[in-house]
Amino acid sequence: MSDNAPDLDRFDLSILRVLAADGRISATELARKIGLSKSPTQARMKRLEESGVITAYRAQLDPIKMGQSHVAFVEVRLSDTREAALQAFNRAVLSVPEVEQCHMMASRFDYLLKVRTASILDYRRVLGERISALPHVASTSTHVAMESVKDSGL
C-alpha cells in the first residue's frame, strides 16, 4: 500500500465489499454480515469515511434507462504537453458533462475519455463542439462501445 493508505484488515475489507454492493444496508445488517457487533462496525465505518477510503454514498443509475445508451472512448492527443497545457485541459474537461471519465495516459495519446450520450448524432455534436474545442486538443480518435460486459467500479 502507499504511504498514506490506511491499514485495512479483513473486517474493513468486508465492510467495503458489502457497502459497494449495497450502500443502503443498515449498520445492524452490515455488522451481522461481517461478523462484528454494531458499535465496532459503526466505528470502523466512521474511520473509513474520515480516512477518505469511503468518499461518498450515492445511487447507482442506469444510464440506458435514462436514454444515455451511446458510449464512446476517445483518445485525445494534445498539441502541447507542458504542465500548464495539461492543467488547462484538466480544468476544461471537467465542464463537459458528457465526459464520464477522463484519464491521463502513458501511451501514444495523452488522454482517454469515456463519453456517454443518447445517440451517435449527439456524440458527433459533443465531439465537434465541446471535446475538440478543449484547450490544446490536436486530434482525437473514437472507439464506439457495442456492449458493456463489466462496468462495476470497485
Image (cartoon, helix red, strand yellow):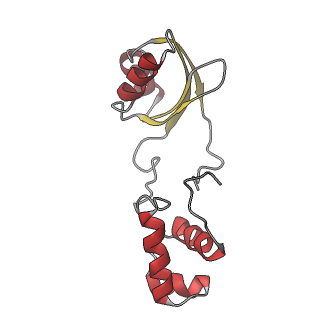
Measuring from the top left, give residue 93's x and y in whole percent.
Answer: 39, 28
Q: For this view, does 115 lie left or right of residue 146?
A: left
Measuring from the top left, give residue 110's x and y in whole percent.
Answer: 57, 21
| Quadrant assignment for the C terminus | bottom right
Residue most toward the front?
Answer: 3
Measuring from the top left, give residue 8's x and y in whole percent.
Answer: 61, 67
Q: Residue at x 56, y 62 (%)?
A: 6
| Quadrant assignment for the N terminus | bottom right
Quarter of the rendering containing residue 61: bottom left
Q: Residue at x 47, y 47 (%)?
A: 64
Q: Nearer the viewer, residue 29 or 141?
A: 29
User: In this picture, is 95 found above or below 134?
Assistant: below
Residue 73 visible in the current orientation? yes
- The count of marks equals 0
Q: Nearer the viewer, residue 14 or 147?
A: 14
Q: Residue at x 36, y 30 (%)?
A: 96
User: In this picture, is 87 found above or below 10?
Assistant: above
User: In this picture, is 116 found above or below 111?
Assistant: below
Residue most toward the left?
Answer: 95
User: In this picture, is 96 found above or below 22?
Assistant: above
Residue 126 visible in the current orientation? no
Q: Residue at x 40, y 34 (%)?
A: 98
